[in-house]
């Protein structure tokens, strides 16, 4: 069907009995245009989020409980030396993690940067580098490389906090 058969040009006479159909046809054509459909845009975003989630959950796992105890236990497995292990606050959260022989990464949905920075500072001492405004901290002298970061996405609607621990080489 050509465009001219749906929408007459200015030289064609339009029968008044069918003239009301033209706006409906234009609306229908816009609605089926997948690239412009709001629901398809939402589905594209959702499918991207699901792909990341499946990637993270497929590699190692999803857990919930005391995040601080989890990070401390895993960090010491990769060579980090804690200055303090008693009397640390509990950090209740749900998180995803992945690990390999060289280290591990933990991803927490939401902005848990301040709580994790306080916990890691109490556990491993003050960071070697810290920029709370940019959402980055780095501990270098703890036996392993340990970093904390906050990422803000989607115009401030999504926040992800991550902890990365890497075993020192040599």
Image: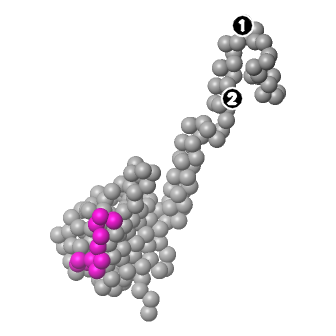
Q: To which quarter of the image does residue 149 belong?
A: bottom left
Q: Is residue 167 visible?
A: yes
Residue at the image point whose x is 26% and y is 62% from the top: 114
Q: To which quarter of the image does residue 85 belong?
A: bottom left
Along the horizontal axis of the image, is 144 left or right of 123?
right
Q: What numbered label is drawn on residue 16?
A: 1
- Name the outermost residue toward the bottom: 170
Along the horizontal axis of the image, is 28 left or right of 157?
right
Looking at the image, what colour scheme do you see? one colour
Q: Is 134 part of what is drawn in magenta?
A: yes
- Residue span colored magenta: 124-135
**Disc 1 and disc 2: Cα gap in Å?**
21 Å
Where does the image place residue 38, in percent across and percent down from the top left?
56, 37
Camera-side residue of 67 and 114: 114
Q: Is residue 75 visible?
A: no
Camera-side residue of 110 and 30: 30
Residue at the image point whose x is 17% and y is 69% from the top: 87
Where does the image place residue 91, in percent across and percent down from the top left?
27, 61
Camera-side residue of 16 and 94: 16
Instruction: Name the secondary structure under disc 2.
Output: helix
Q: Which is more N-terminal, label 2 or label 1?
A: 1
Main SS of residues in magenta: loop
Where does the image place residue 120, in percent across and percent down from the top left?
27, 71
Q: To which quarter of the image does residue 165 belong?
A: bottom left
Q: Which residue is label 2 attached to?
A: 29
Quadrant of the image for the N terminus? top right
């Amino acid at each position: 069907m050509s465009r001219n058969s749906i929408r007459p040009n200015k030289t064609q006479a339009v029968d008044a009995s069918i003239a009301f159909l033209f706006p409906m046809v234009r609306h229908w054509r816009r609605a089926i245009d997948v690239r412009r459909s709001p629901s398809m845009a939402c589905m594209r975003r959702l499918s991207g989020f699901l792909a990341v989630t499946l990637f993270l959950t497929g590699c190692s796992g999803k857990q919930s409980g005391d995040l601080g105890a989890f990070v401390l236990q895993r960090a010491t497995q990769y060579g980090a030396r804690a200055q303090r292990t008693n009397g640390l606050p509990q950090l209740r959260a749900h998180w995803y993690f992945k690990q390999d022989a060289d280290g591990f990464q933990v991803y927490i949905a939401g902005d848990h940067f301040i709580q994790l920075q306080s916990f890691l500072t109490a556990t491993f001492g003050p960071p070697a580098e810290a920029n709370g405004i940019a959402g980055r901290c780095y501990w270098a002298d703890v036996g392993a490389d340990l970093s904390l970061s906050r990422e803000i996405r989607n115009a401030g609607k999504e926040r992800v906090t991550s902890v990365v621990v890497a075993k020192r080489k040599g």
